[in-house]
Amino acid sequence: MKHARLILLVLLVLVPGAASIATQGGVPGDVAVTRALQTLLGEASGWALPVTHLAKAPWLWASMCVAIVLAWLAGGILRVPAPVLAYGFAWGADQILRSLIFVPRPDDALVTLASASSSSGLPSTFGLVFGALFGAALWIAGSGVRHQAILALSLLFMAVGAAARIVLGGHWLSQMVPSLALGVLLAGLAVWLVERAARRFQFA
């Protein structure tokens, strides 16, 4: 199951990411998705802008606390460091990729923008951060209703966050998907490292 998830996430990073780089902007369907979400959820930033702030300090620390609680509920106290480590990986990946990649953000001639930005739309810093923080719980093994509820809540946080960025015209869907997927992959690496350390601690 984890191998299939890993392959799917790698594909979600590479395929839309490569398409976005090749087209230097939106791919077919991006404009339609953005317009549909703006029609359905509203173009005003009343709800979406505060959600965006959850990936930036100081509200970032509230998001991290929620992610830590979810990791604790999913796997116990020894899994608590996973979201913190995953965030560190996401921050590093963001710095590296932004120095190597530039893809324009959505065009105000095509969709409504809350604010224009000249920075690269790929990767999405928000997507990397939310994928890393809330993706950690997805890699922690467990079963039962509570575990399923934690997974659903983690996915909901990521989905709402992605919708907020798209509604604001901050990123195309083809930029959000690979960014979130890469964040979740980094969360998987963090969980693997934390669980290895936890096993060594338990057997020490």
Image (spheres, rainbow, N blue to C red):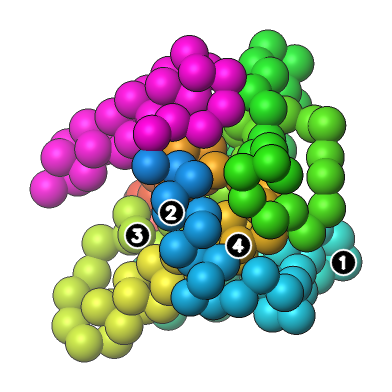
Instruction: Tell me which numbered mark, 2 or 1, is placed earlier along the sequence.
Output: 2
Main SS type for the magenta part? helix
Instruction: Tell me which numbered mark, 3 or 4, is placed earlier along the sequence.
Output: 3
Q: Position of residue 119 (x, y in %)?
A: 80, 31
Q: Is residue 57 left or right of residue 23?
A: right
Q: Amino acid at mark 3?
A: Leu
The stretch of residues the image draws in magenta is 1-28
- For the residues labelled 3 and 2, the Cα–Cα distance comes to 26 Å
Q: Amino acid at mark 4?
A: Val
From the image, tell me which residue sits under label 4: 167
From the image, tell me which residue sits under label 2: 33
Q: Residues within 10 Å of mark 1 (few under 14, many from 20)?
A: few
Most distant residue in the bottom direction: 145
- For the residues labelled 4 and 1, the Cα–Cα distance comes to 23 Å
Say if 35 sits above or below 185 in the image. below
Q: Which mark is residue 138?
A: 3
